[in-house]
Amino acid sequence: MSVFHFQNQWLCLPLAKSFFSKLLPRTYSAVLPQRLGTIWCHSLVHATNVHFSPDGLEQVGDNTFVSPKVKILKQKLELLGISLDNSCLPGQYHNLFCSKCKGGQLKERSLSFHIISDGEFAMWRCFRTACGWAGQVFADDKELYSEVCDNAKSFGQIAEESLGLKPLGPKLVAYFKERLISEKTLIRNAVRQLSDNKSVIAFTYKQNGLLVGCKYRTMEKRFWQGKGTDKILYGIDDIRQADEIIIVEGEIDKLSLEEAGFRNCVSVPGGAPGKVSSKDLPPIEKDSAYQYLWNCKEYLDKADRIILATDNDPPGQALAEELARRLGRERCWQIHWPKKDEFSSFKDANEVLKYLGADALKRIVANAEPYANAN
């Protein structure tokens, strides 16, 4: 076996019908052979060799990358982070970088990608077991979507209607108004409510403009996340090109910072730990409690300065430390919430906004200290 072949043997993947059959419209899945031959995709951008069995599914004809249908597919795929170059022709299989898991620690080209030869739709599946992202997109006007296949996780756009969401009603608008959060901010962040329960807030999680999950909160502060919600930071699209980022502990705090003029803010999706772990940091793939950081690593890596604005209580302080351990203390800064009275301090961004106002919140952010000095 040659050295080149050995280095790339992990890319030699026998593609079974079951991998993609659930993604295919019935007219295409019906004609899939029981098994295609081995597909060899070397880990070079332009080195893609496809070997079909004698009764292979299709042959590449005169399709070109510039066909109108493929142009539409390319535009939709770019929204999901799948970038295609001119070597990605219809009728061929390609191994690309997965925009969901980024190929893991080994940076593998783990996304098996295919455009049907007539350019009607594209489909993909990540072969990393820790990811399994699979989906399809159509060239016509059908809504972009992905489906869960076997152990795969959904990633594509979810329809708000399918989650039973609708615009906020007067009761919840008033709830936010009491906390000095405007309707303009609520609309921009697509905050919704459940259709069948006017007391449940729905914080929509979006990435690349697509709805990828939802977190719910009652007015009594009971929280839960929708099934299949991606582990990402809330408001991730707001820090796409940011070189300075603010991280808070709750969605309402993210909205509060926006009222003070800061859109470069994201919230962690879950709560804070009870205490700082005494153990060494686990490998990324086992760091499940903070997987949302690694899933957003591409965004966070662009930041030179990260301001930690977690809650002013022991769990919030523990969260700040755990974040700094993973993000790098040297680029982290920390906010100190001011005294409320002789015995207590303000807890978080929304409490400051509500009682001291947006200008005071802005000054507090401006006075953040380097994390190393603050601790």
Image (spheres, rainbow, N blue to C red):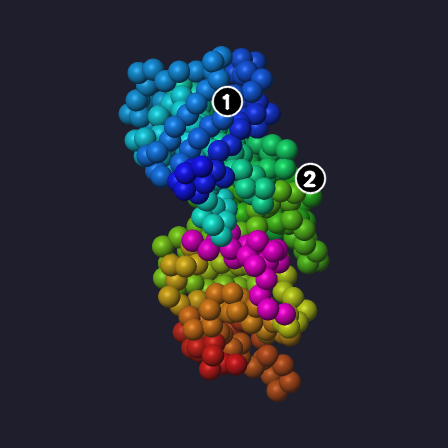
Picture layout, residue 122 above or below residue 317: above
Q: Where's residue 47, x and y in %?
A: 35, 33
Secondary element under disc 1, as helix, strand or loop, is strand
Stretch of the chain drawn in magenta: 279-298
Amino acid type indicated by mark 1: Gly
Check residue 196 in the rendering and tell me which mark sits there, or answer none.
2
Q: Where's residue 10, x and y in %?
A: 50, 39
Q: Residue at x 43, y 73 (%)?
A: 330
| Badge count | 2
Q: Can you identify the residue that label 1 sits on?
A: 37
Q: Residue at x 40, y 68 (%)?
A: 305
Q: Residue at x 41, y 38 (%)?
A: 2
Of pointers 2 and 1, the one earlier in the residue sequence: 1
Magenta span includes 94 = no
Q: Give left or right: position of 71 versus 254.
A: left
Amino acid type indicated by mark 2: Asp
- Identify which residue, 29 or 49, lies in the foreground: 49
- Identify which residue, 8 or 201, lies in the foreground: 8
Secondary element under disc 2, as helix, strand or loop, is loop
The mark closer to the camera, 2 or 1, is 1
- Identify which residue, 54 or 335, lies in the foreground: 54
Magenta span includes 282 = yes
